[in-house]
Image: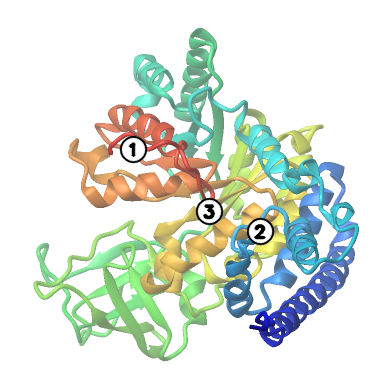
Amino acid sequence: MLPTVPNAAPRRRANLGLERLLSDLERLRDQVAAEGRRTYEGWRPRIARRSFGLSALNLAHYLALRRNDLRALQLELMPFGLSSLGRCEARVLPNLDAVIASLRAIAGEPDTASDQPSARAFFRGERLLRLEAERVFGPTPPNRAVRIMVTLPPDAATSYEFVEELVARGMDCARINCAHDDREAWAAMVAHVRRAASELQRTCRVCIDLAGPKVRTAEIDLPSDDHRVHIDDTILLCDKAVSAPSDFAVRMRCTIPEVVGHLRKGDPVWINDGRIGAVIEDVLPAGAVLRITAARAKGEKLRPDKGLNFPDTKLPVASLTDRDCEDLDFVAEHADIIGYSFVREPSDVQRLRSELAARRPDPERVAIMLKIETAQAVRNLPDLIVEAGGHQPVAVMIARGDLAVEIGYRRLAEMQEELLWLCEAASVPVVWATQVLDGFVKNGVPSRAEFTDAAMAERAECVMLNKGPYVADAVALLDDVLGRMEGHQVKKTSRLRALHSW
């Protein structure tokens, strides 16, 4: 019997498929390199800090890469046991080069070993991110890489023991909000943090948030103290004292009057962190007429000093207000990190840097934390990062409260992922903020959802807790959770630590 001759046609077809895949990847690599270089050259004049140059270049490559839909390419790579490109944020070109070199080796091309990037080049992005996190937040804690930031309550100004306990339990950064308290209280808080860190021999940085142009409700005229608004009710939003036509039972003023004149019919409005939704039904000489579109069935109470969000309205206010400039006299002297609220455009960062330079000889030593709270800030994030990071250490806070209201709760989950990816590509540390372990901080009883959220925060470089009676216990709990999760997850990469439950 004659020996069976293998059919070479399937192998040739497989080789043709491999060659096409390799060709597609090489074209993608060339496109990403060229587009990224053009973007970077546009940024280069704004980059004075040499240590940020490589990070900015990788960010430019990442933006070029993610303009492509890579899902089909990911699936084709998986059967070869190669990277699906799903974890390339910190190393865009090295990741593409590694995949291409491996495919060439599989295809039998000679001398492919020289095309493989070195381990040092491959993991350079991780090193740059770690160094930037240390520039912003100080040395990495011994038991976890993710830092813990705590918003200090008024008690921190009067009780050194309270601050000492927070530092002892694991607080790595104390946040002071200029929207509350006064300079005397801020100074006492800073002194307590510095003293506790020195006595406990721990690093604890001080982050001071500028209040920014947060629009809030001012005085409100209601038919009765317990009055609630319901869907289809109308409110008159005034730009001055709440005198108005008698046919509006509910009238209120906002804290930034010039906003009212820029509202247009059909613009959405959210009140009290999104608890009340409305739409501009009309604009009258006396103010803007809001019709309620979202509220609980039992109605919602209106209160002064609650947030107002206008997601589709371009507000005529600067991100750095006159009050911020006054507060900056104190902040520039005492802060390790300046939280920049409602930053929207690169020119906002330029102005902050200019004001900072007018107040201290070494402004580049102060880190800037960009608080991403609006859709405009999301769109401009690459340029905001370059404008800030090109001159001094930079971090990004995902301010999930205001951001959810501005872009819609449905988009928040995907947006916080995209912000994490973009910042990792730029080697910029991220602060995961708003209502982390909120129930536990306020009531001492955490929910399952809060634990999951806290565990997911391990993918950031810092997690922020808000103030509440159980915040010290929450710091200790978070310290434990983050330490445990580090054995399982780093950014988007699952770590295969040995399992002990089975």
Q: Where is residue 80 in the image (x, y as percent from the top left)?
A: 63, 66
Q: Where is residue 410 in the image (x, y as percent from the top left)?
A: 37, 73
Q: Position of residue 195 (x, y in %)?
A: 51, 13
Q: What element carries label 3?
A: loop
- Closer to the camera, 486 or 53? 486
- Image quarter of the N terminus: bottom right
Q: What element carries label 2?
A: loop
Q: Which comes before the other along the chain, label 3 or label 2?
A: 2
Q: Residue 492 carries which label?
A: 3
At x 49% / y 73%, what residue is drawn? 259
Name which residue type carries label 1.
Lys
Q: Which comes before the other along the chain, label 2 or label 1?
A: 2
Of tags 3 and 1, the one toward the viewer is 3
Q: To which residue does mark 2 refer?
A: 88
- Closer to the camera, 62 or 132? 62
Q: Which comes before the other along the chain, label 3 or label 1?
A: 1
Name which residue type carries label 3.
Lys
Q: Which mark is residue 467?
A: 1
| Cβ–Cβ under 8 Å for marks 3 and 1 | no
Asked where in the image residue 351 lies, by quadrant, the reply is: bottom right
For label 2, count other residues whose C-alpha is less than 10 Å away and answer few (under 14), some (14-19) or many (20+): many
Left or right: residue 209 compared with residue 39: left
Above or below, comparing residue 500 to residue 161 in the picture: below
